[in-house]
Image (spheres, coloured by chain):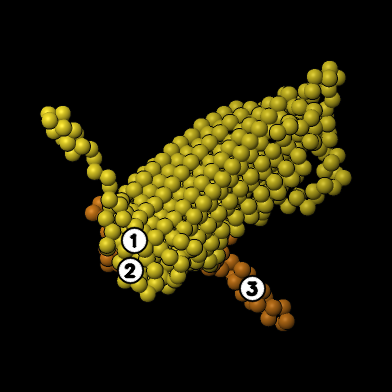
């Protein structure tokens, strides 16, 4: 009888171990998985959590896009989670699949991509400064790379 | 009479001497701040600011002026604005204490900002607690000399010490930068020279290049910065006679090279860094006359690197001389001194008679199995390395120094 009680507890434990929650970025310590630079700017940091729970951290959305392009296995997997910082709320992650990416020359993102992510289209529009600015969604962004 | 008329005419033709004035700024006088003095001044004038503390909320310098601080007057923005912005060519700005620029994620607020100007000299200033220190945007022919920049060492509120964006032909000499994000940052900055600077204890890099070609940095010291020096996405950089010391920790490098080609690393000293030089996608580099002393990894070359030359260097007391992650082809090692070399020199010509293989078997094992680092300096590892040296089988055949020197190169 006792084993029956332990079993669900053990099961629960394993499920917890496999939960895929974002790992906070240690700014000034963690290095970008793509460009090797130390991640420091909260406005642009990004993170991937793969189906297996492996975590990759990036200093910029353009680095994450570059990484995804080099690892098609991760991008084609629906279970992969892509997170980007909301430019208006530095350090807060939003789902990249629902985010709006503003490509504007006035944005000095760490890897020269001039790219920032926003949670809503209107906030992305509001941050436009350059005439040539373009707004992408996630799939268009990957195509543009 | 005729000659006299001619003389008068000639005298009139002489250029009038420039009537440059000197304006003195002092607290409690009719010219109580720099802003007022700039309003009164004409091109070519000199402004002298006497000792004192002045509030300065983005004081605009839009005339060709020589502005001198006497006995270190303080310009303080009280975290409300930038301190000084220069938008005119031919300005000299010397001898100030620039303090407390605004911080924040909206704009890159700076202590001294130069916007689209030429022929400006920024010298002998002390910049304390600014978000960005000296910020050059779209500038040409600027001299940044003998300034001291001390940041806040706050990860959220630290910009770069000396920041260049889209600049050309800039001289950065004799500055001291500490506690900023990157000590000196170059983005799209070309044909510039960085010399005799001291960059230490910055949060990220002591010096950082992005997309900046044809630059030279020499005689600088980079000490204990968050991640050393990073040279990325550039071409034709000369790195000469610098000292890289105590850049220590995980993912921290003396120099991080990524996507760079046709550059020279010469006469530098790398002392007690975790990894002295890390190379990825790096081609056609000449790495000569350097000293690698007491580093964890002296050189880490990834398989993506091609046609690099390592010559006349000294390798002393490094845990690993060279490591790689795959087959390393087409990279040349020659005439280096390796303290781990155990060959002989029967013909006494100073050159070892058998080649030295800088990649040890143990380094290859760690590559496959990082946990095996716990066996470091153990008897079994020494044995493995000795066997491998005698009968090479696992280490890459192509990586060897055919002419290792028996004695270190004297500098």
Q: Position of residue B8 (x, y in %)?
A: 17, 36
- Asked whether the viewer can see residue B240, the reply is yes
| Disc 1 residue crowd, few under 14, some 14–19, many 20+, Cα 10 Å | some
Of mark 1 and mark 2, the one earlier in the sequence is 1
Residue at the spot 60% in from the left edge and 58% down from the top edge: B201
For disc 2, the marked residue is B31
Marks 2 and 3, how far apart at CA: 73 Å
Q: Chain B colour?
A: yellow
Q: Is residue A33 above or below residue B320?
A: below
Q: Which residue is mark 1?
A: B23
In the drawing, does residue B388 fall left or right of residue B296?
A: right
Q: Which colour represents chain A?
A: orange
Residue closer to the observer: B348 or B381: B348
The chain identifier of the residue carrying mark 1 reads B
In the structure shown, which secondary structural element does the residue marked by tag 2 occupy?
A: loop
C-alpha span from label 1 to label 2: 8 Å
* Residue drawn at 63 percent across, 45 percent down: B243
Q: Position of residue B350 (x, y in %)?
A: 79, 23
Residues tagged by mark 3 and mark 1 found on one chain of the structure: no
Whether residue A14 is situated above or below residue B226 in the rendered picture? below
Chain letter, disc 2 residue: B
In which image quadrant can residue B390 be found? top right
Nearer the observer, B51 or B384: B51
Secondary element under disc 1, as helix, strand or loop, is: strand
Determine whether, in the image, residue B13 is placed left or right of residue A135. left
Q: Are marks 2 and 3 in contact (CB under 8 Å)?
A: no
Image position, residue B130 (x, y; %) = 46, 64
Q: Residue at x 80, y 32 (%)?
A: B341
Residue A116 lies, with reference to residue A35, above or below; the image says below
């Amino acid at each position: 009888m006792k084993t029956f009680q332990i079993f669900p507890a053990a099961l629960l434990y394993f499920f917890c171990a496999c939960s895929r929650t974002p790992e906070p970025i240690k700014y000034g310590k963690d290095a970008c998985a793509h460009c090797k630079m130390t991640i420091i700017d909260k406005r642009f940091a990004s993170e991937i959590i793969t189906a297996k729970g492996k975590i990759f951290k990036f200093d910029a959305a353009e680095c994450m896009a570059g990484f995804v392009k080099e690892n098609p296995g991760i991008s084609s997997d629906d279970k992969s989670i892509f997170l980007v910082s909301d430019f208006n709320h530095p350090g807060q992650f939003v789902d990249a699949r629902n985010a709006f990416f503003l490509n504007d020359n006035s944005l000095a993102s760490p890897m020269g991509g001039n790219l920032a992510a926003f949670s809503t289209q209107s906030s992305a529009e509001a941050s436009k400064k350059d005439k040539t600015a373009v707004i992408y969604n996630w799939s268009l962004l990957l195509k543009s790379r | 009479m005729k000659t006299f008329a001619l003389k008068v005419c000639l005298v009139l033709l002489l250029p009038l001497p420039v009537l440059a004035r000197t304006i003195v700024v002092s607290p409690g006088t009719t010219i109580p701040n720099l802003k007022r003095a700039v309003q009164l001044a004409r091109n070519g004038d000199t402004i002298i600011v006497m000792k004192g503390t002045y509030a300065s909320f983005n004081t605009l310098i839009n005339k060709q002026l020589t502005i001198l601080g006497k006995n270190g007057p303080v310009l303080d923005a009280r975290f409300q604005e930038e301190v000084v912005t220069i938008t005119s060519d031919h300005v000299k700005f010397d001898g100030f204490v620039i303090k407390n620029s605004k911080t924040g994620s909206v704009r890159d607020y700076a202590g001294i900002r130069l916007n689209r100007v030429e022929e400006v000299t920024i010298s002998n200033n002390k910049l304390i607690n600014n978000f960005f220190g000296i910020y050059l945007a779209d500038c040409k022919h600027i001299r940044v000399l003998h300034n001291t920049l001390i940041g806040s060492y706050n990860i959220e509120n630290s910009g770069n010490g000396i920041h260049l964006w889209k600049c050309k032909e800039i001289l950065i000499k004799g500055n001291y930068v500490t506690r900023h994000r990157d000590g000196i940052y170059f983005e799209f900055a070309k044909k510039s020279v960085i010399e005799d600077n001291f960059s230490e204890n910055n949060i990220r890099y002591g010096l950082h290049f992005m997309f900046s070609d044809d630059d030279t940095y020499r005689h600088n010291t980079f000490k204990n910065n968050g991640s050393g020096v990073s040279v990325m996405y550039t071409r034709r950089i000369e790195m000469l006679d610098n000292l890289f010391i105590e850049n220590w920790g995980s993912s921290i490098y003396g120099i991080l090279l990524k996507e760079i080609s046709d550059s020279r690393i010469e006469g530098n000293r790398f002392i007690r860094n975790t990894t002295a030089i890390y190379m990825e996608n790096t081609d056609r580099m000449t790495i000569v006359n350097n000293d690698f002393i007491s580093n964890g990894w002296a050189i880490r070359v990834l398989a993506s690197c091609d046609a690099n030359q390592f010559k006349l260097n000294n390798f002393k007391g490094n845990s690993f001389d060279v490591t790689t992650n795959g087959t390393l082809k087409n990279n040349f090692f020659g005439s280096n001194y390796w303290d781990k070399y155990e060959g002989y020199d029967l013909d006494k010509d100073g050159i070892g008679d058998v080649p030295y293989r800088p990649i040890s078997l143990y380094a290859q094992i760690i590559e496959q199995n990082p946990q095996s680092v716990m066996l470091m300096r153990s008897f079994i590892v020494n044995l493995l390395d000795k066997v491998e040296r005698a009968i090479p089988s696992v280490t890459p055949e192509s990586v060897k120094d055919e002419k290792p020197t028996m004695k270190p190169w004297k500098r």
